[in-house]
Image: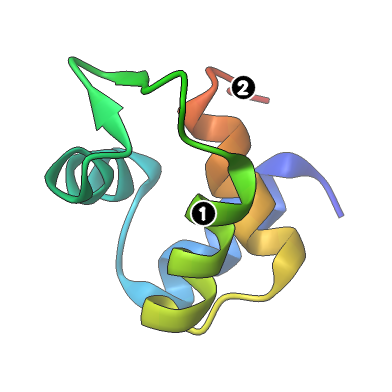
Amino acid sequence: MSFQAYIDNIKTKTGKSPEDFKKLAEQKGFMKSGQLVPTVKATEITNWLKQEFDLGHGHAMAIYAAFKGKTD
């Protein structure tokens, strides 16, 4: 599955885009000024996405990758 397919599936399931998740991550303290906080681990973010949005591991990692700047 391509990165874009993961993002499309996440949008269909949650109604949220990577930008929406970035805003939520800022509210949670995982990001600041659009950048990941250096002390935040990928596991913290993926666990949050799995618990609150019922995403699978691969989909949660796609959002984490988007947080790190991956766009394709």
Task: Tell which circle, 1 or 2, labels the residue nearer the N-terminal end.
Answer: 1
Number of on-image labels: 2
Circle 1 crowding by C-alpha within 10 Å: few under 14, some 14–19, many from 20: few
Q: Position of residue 7 (x, y in %)?
A: 56, 52
Residue 43 vs 54, above or below: the answer is above
Q: Position of residue 54 (x, y in %)?
A: 50, 84
For the point 62% across and 53% down, the residue is: 43
Residue 10 vs 69, above or below: the answer is below
Residue 5 vs 54, above or below: the answer is above
- Mark 1 or mark 2: which is in front? 1
**Is residue 65 rendered to the left or right of residue 16?**
right
Mark 1: secondary structure: helix
Task: Pick whichever, 39 or 52, lies toward us.
Answer: 39
* The disc label shown at residue 70, or none: 2
For the point 35% across and 50% down, the residue is: 17
For the point 12% across and 46% down, the residue is: 27
| Amino acid type, callout 2 | Lys
Q: Position of residue 51 (x, y in %)?
A: 46, 81
For the point 67% across and 56% down, the residue is: 6
**Is residue 8 rendered to the left or right of residue 5?**
left
* The disc label shown at residue 44, or none: 1
Mark 2: secondary structure: loop
**Is residue 22 rendered to the left or right of residue 48?**
left
Quarter of the picture holding the C terminus: top right
Per the model, the C-alpha gap separating discs 1 and 2 is 19 Å
Quarter of the picture holding the N terminus: bottom right
Farthest front residue in view: 39
Task: Pick whichever, 40 or 26, lies toward us.
Answer: 40
**Is residue 27 rendered to the left or right of residue 68?**
left
Farthest right residue in view: 1
| Amino acid type, callout 1 | Glu
